[in-house]
Each structure stands twice: as structure tokens, then as C-alpha cells.
Amino acid sequence: MKSMPPIDLRSDTVTQPTAAMRAAMLEAPLGDDVFGDDPTVNRLQSRIADMLGFEAALFMPSGTQSNLCALLSHCERGDEGIVGQFAHTYRWEGGGAAVFGSIQPQPLAHQADGTLALADIEANIKPDDSHFARSRLLCLENTLGGQVMPLAYLRQATALARRHGLAAHLDGARLFNAAVASGGDARIAAREIAACFDSVSVCFSKGLGAPVGSALCGSKALIAKAHRVRKMAGGGMRQAGVLAAAALHALDHHIDRLAEDHAHAMQLAAGLQGLPGVCVEPPQTNIVFVDVAPERVKRDGKGIVERAREQGLLCTGLLRLRFVTHLDVSRSDIDNAVGILRGIL
Ligand SMILES: *Cc1c(COP(=O)(O)O)cnc(C)c1O
């Protein structure tokens, strides 16, 4: 085991570009994208905008910058965004929207299924009164910690936001995982989800397996604003077509295969089910959470993550372990991972 490369279930961001993806990157025609001259970036931007039913899109170096540009394009200083307590844009992006945009977050507690209760959203939309920040945006996430937000809920929540004059942004870092999990045509499902929102951010660097990159989709006017913010954030990239080519390749070849990652997550969950002191959350997509009773976590002063690493399995967490399946993990890797974890637990 030890001489083999580790089984890396820390994140779906760890994938290496496939040989075919590298070939596509090598062959891509390039230009200076700050001058708007990179044909491959331009092709990717129109492709993802068309796929998700938007007028325009902008290639971004990261999902964090994509969300930041979205928030700063929707909101002015002193505006407020309603967001889930565990949302990436609120919890995992260094407070960027507040730091760079003076945008005040209004975090709400999630329901067990990850949604924000419609009543909570409505109760937190502030009246037009000088005491309050201006409620301007509802920001949702799909998938959220691997959970799929039901389409009917997305429609209701965004319609509610609109009735109150708020715009709606989706952090769809794993939008295509949600779309594939719907079981139907993933492209149609992705478009239906996106149709609820004024803007959508998607990551190519997660389950889709590209090395770098995200896209922000929206109206022409919104994307024009986002373009300026991206420049301010230092996200204007030059011959970025070498990266956009990887994203295009991912859109052509890596969407439907996300179903394999979901099957592997189920396989892992099934393999760990029933161990004493261990509670496995049944996965909906490619992320498995495993809660471990505190008394089972440490042995010889070492936590589970550390002991797993010694045996060639990488994961994250402490009492709540997280395993993420992806392109570079096979069925037999999952069998091995289950063996290692059963031994430890
Ligand atoms: C990974 C992720 C992002 C940010 O992407 P980076 O490219 O790592 O900046 C945003 N939202 C969600 C839900 C994510 O999982």
C-alpha cells in the first residue's frame, strides 16, 4: 500500500488533467484575453452561457473570485445579501464580499435538507427604512455540502426574492453534480436550475476535472460589471485559453461521468455503514460525511485522518470526516479506502 500513490479523497479539486485534456490544452489557439483576443476563452464563455441559458459569461481564475465578482456586481456598499450559515460565499471565502464590497451578509440557519426556510428568508428581507441595510440579493448554493437543493424549492425561493425586488445568485460550484443527480438529461437539468437565477457561478476545477477555472454567467449588463470587478481583483488573465481549453474538454467529456463519482460515494457509504460509533450520512452526490463518536477518534494520540494518511488514504475532518469522490478515484480505490477505514474505526 505505502509505495502506491495515496487515495486522495480530500476534495474533487485534486484531480490531474487527463491525457486527452492535456492534449486539448496544448492545441488550443490562444490570444491575450485582457484584450478580448483569446479565441478559446471566448468559445468557452459563449458555450457555458448558452448551456445555462444566459446572455453572457466570464471565465474566472477561481470560484471564490467568481462569487466575489457576482456579489459586487449585484450589490452596492451598504446592500445586504441573504445567505445560508454554511454557504461557501459566507463561511469559506474570507468574508471577501464584506471586505472588498462593504456588502453585509444576513446569514440564516439551514433546514436539515440544506435549504433556507422560505419564512426565514421573507422575515429577513428588510423594509425600505434608513435603519436597515438594503436587502438586495439572495445567494443560494447547489449542491451544498453534496446535498441537492430540490428544483421546486429553488423556484419558490427565487420567486420570493424577486417579489421583494431582490436578485438571486447561485453558487453552483457543483451545479453539474446536482444536475446529474436528478437522473434525467444533465444538460436540461442544469439549465432548469440556472433558469431560477440572475447569475450562476460554476467551477470547472471540481468534479469536472479541469486544473483551474470557473465561470460566472448572467445578463450582458451584469457580466460587464463583473468584468470590471474581475480586473480590480487582478483576475484578468492573458493567454488563458490554455485553461479554457481544459474547461471546454471537461464540458464535452466529464459531465455524465459524474454519475460514477456519485456511485463511488454510495459504495464508500455502504462500506462504512453499521460500524459501532460511526454514523454515515447517505450521500446524494460525491461527498460523504461520516460522524465518529468522540471516544473513537483518537488512538495512541493520533486522529483518524492521521492514521488513514499513514495507510495511504487522504481525507479531512475530525469528529465529522469528509470524503469526496472524483475522476481520479476508481472502484477498487474505494474498496481499499473502505478496508483502511474499517481497520481504523
Ligand atoms: C470550491 C467552492 C467554491 C470556490 O472555488 P475555488 O475555486 O476553490 O475558489 C465556491 N463555492 C463552493 C460551494 C465550492 O465548493
Image: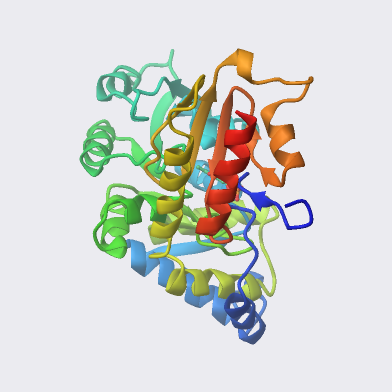
> Residue 73: horizontal and vertical position, in percent?
49, 46
Residue 242 in view (yes/no): yes
Q: How many marks?
A: 0
Q: Is residue 26 left or right of residue 105?
A: right
Residue at 26% across, 40% down: 150
Q: Nearer the viewer, residue 56 or 309?
A: 309
Residue 102 in view (yes/no): no
Q: How is the image coloured?
A: rainbow
> Residue 304: horizontal and vertical position, in percent?
67, 29
Q: Is residue 25 above or below residue 103?
A: below
In the picture, residue 320 is in which quadrant?
Answer: top right
Residue at 34% across, 21% down: 128
In the picture, residue 245 is in which quadrant?
Answer: bottom right
In the picture, residue 255 is in which quadrant?
Answer: bottom left
Quadrant where the C terminus lies?
A: top right
Residue at 29% across, 34% down: 161
Q: Is residue 150 above or below residue 85?
A: below
Q: Is residue 282 above or below residue 246?
A: above
Q: Nearer the viewer, residue 339 or 32?
A: 339
Residue at 65% across, 64% down: 16
Q: Is residue 184 left or right of residue 198?
A: left
> Residue 317: horizontal and vertical position, in percent?
63, 30
> Residue 316: horizontal and vertical position, in percent?
64, 36
